[in-house]
Amino acid sequence: MNISDITKRVLLPVILLLMTGVHIFADDNITFTAQAPQAVVLGDRFRITYKVNTRDVKEFRAPDMKSIQIITGPATSTSSSTTIMNGKVESSTTITYTYTAVATEEGEVQLDGATIKANGKQISSNKLTIKVLPPDKTTQQGSQGQGGSSSGQQQSAAQGTSAVGNDDLFMLATVDKTTVYEQEAILLSFKIYAAPSVNLTSMSSKMPDLKNFHVQEVELPQQKEFQLEHYNGRNYQTMLWLQYVLFPQHSGELEIPATPFEGTVAQRVARSSNDVFDMFFNSDRYVEVKKELNTRSIRINVKPLPQGKTSSYYGGVGDFSISSTISSTDVNANDAVTLRVILSGTGNLKLTKTPEVKFPQDFDIYDPKIDNKYTIKGGRQTGNKVYEYLVVPRHAGQYTIPAVEFQYFDPKSGSYKTVKTDEYTLNVAKGQGGSDSQTSVAYVNKEDLKYVGQDVRFHSTPSVLKSDKSHFYGSLLFWICLVIPPVILLVLVIISRKRISDNANAAKVRVRKASSVATKRLKVAHKLMKEGRKNEFYDEMMRALSGYLGDKLAIPTAELSKDRIGETLHERKVPEESVKQVIGLLDDCEFARYAPGDDTGRMDRLYEQAAALIGQIENTIR
């Protein structure tokens, strides 16, 4: 029996056993999901997909597609993958059912989940909600008066690019309410509206001037995505750009001023018959056009808080509750007691003052520790604020810690409300040794500290002096300790210099190969662009640019940021315009992945800019 026969007989059963075990493991975690666009336009085609992560699927049944016309489908496709990590083999199979559909009625369409039978079990997918938007009014009017507009479009194409209209790209500032009370939360949102034909590549903005408000920015997802929305008779690609929660600090008519934004749009330049470059490559070119987007100012009517405040009002406006806990109600004198007061709810939590607790006079009271645990959810500040009071009773007896009252103003009802904690009875026993005070040095009263050092005197006795005839100086141990440190220092210097030399050589190699590595990555990106693989293209472009800049400028990967790149380029005497182009190109690559518009034109433009910038930097930094 030869080696190949032994391999087949031994390895084949093992591989089959591993694959079978993986298959069983995957089937125990079956997922069946449905996907569709959140919003579609009436009459436009879109896709509905159902995915299941197992091969053993029977009796796929789609739900009743009410108000939706199926054009084609279901088209079935299967994909499989196998990975081996740390000796563990994992395999997965995904079956996809795809429908091409058209919505036939405006409004909101609810689709029930589809069903399948997998591994003898019936499984349902998630439900879908699709918002069907009406078509553009301008599109309908344009189709009726097509003869008059076609000549204008031809003239615009002949001239090259056309300006982006105010109705094609704008920023809209909105608030959830315009009449509020003092300290009542307002949600301010800035949203981008871009027509599908607008190729928006980047957006810049500054913090709006909101001096009359306490401002908290809402954290939005880093990877922002455009959504389809119908506004003023047109369909736009929209994106929530910024969001703030505002708390007006005084009454009267306050203004949220107009806020400037600037968008960058890539516009196609028509091919010229006189341009040799265009004739040879037979491709369109793109130019970047800056578009100022100014929002309108918004006036807020802020009403003063009404009469009715009490001493237990600590500035709260919203909806709150309060509770408390105590570490123990049975303690000894001079033992520390911790009272925790928890203020929970929704409103201006951050701006509330510390509630006052009326502890007995014989208690030593320390400043409370405050722990803020609030977040922004649904455009509102919600969570809790924990006040931790540390007190020390000095004498035995029975004491009462009264309830903590917290009065707040409820904007919904327009009235003040009061909530309070429980009342506690504290039983304090005598301390150790039968005394009820000053039994522990740690809890000596502050007034008594000045006497320490005057009332206590220590009696000292001289120690007996002995003669030690042994001498360390001049001994063998003395010379060993004298010689070893310089030897260790010399070895460390040699090792350090060797490492510096090795690192310098590695850095030189990295700098020397930066251009060739970037060229290879750009070739991969160009191939992805030709194949229309948008996400993979932008990922490869970011790797090519960041990898090249990190290698060329000798910046460690952990420290590679746009600020560090800009500083290093300035230090290497790269022109300011080139530095701005590099930073702008990095921003464009991050933004373009989720931007609507002509992906082919955008990818081609970014590819050409990257190649040109790398060439400029190579000519500047030798």
Image (cartoon, rainbow, N blue to C red):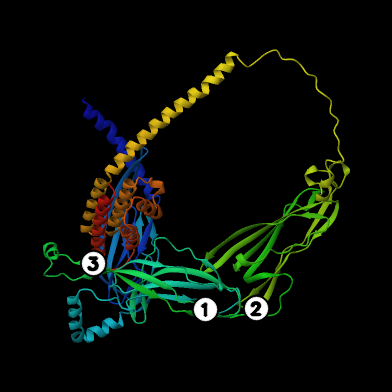
Q: Nearer the viewer, mark 3 or mark 2?
A: 3
Q: Residue at x 86, y 51 (%)?
A: 396
Residue 255 numbered tag: 1
Residue 242, how many percent across, how many down? 44, 68
251 to 27, vertically: above or below = below
295 to 206, vertically: above or below = below
Give the CA separation, mark 1 to mark 3: 40 Å
Residue 606, how many percent across, how many down? 26, 60
Describe the element under mark 1 as helix, strand or loop: strand
Left or right position of 349 against 96: right
Give the CA separation, mark 3 to mark 2: 56 Å
Q: Amino acid at mark 1?
A: Glu
Give the CA separation, mark 1 to mark 2: 19 Å
Q: Amino acid at mark 2?
A: Leu
Left or right position of 6 against 320: left
Residue 286 numbered tag: 3
Q: Nearer the viewer, mark 1 or mark 2?
A: 1
Describe the element under mark 2 as helix, strand or loop: loop
Q: Residue at x 37, y 38 (%)?
A: 86
Q: Amino acid at mark 3?
A: Tyr
Left or right position of 451 against 3: right
Indicate the quadrant where residue 120 lies.
bottom left
**Is there a contact, CB below 8 Å, between mark 1 and mark 3?**
no
Residue 590, how many percent across, how many down? 35, 59
Disc 1 crowd, CA 10 A, few/some/many (<14, 14-19, 20+)? some
Left or right position of 371 against 25: right
Nearest the viewer among 197 and 441 is 441
**Is there a contact, CB below 8 Å, between mark 3 and mark 2?**
no
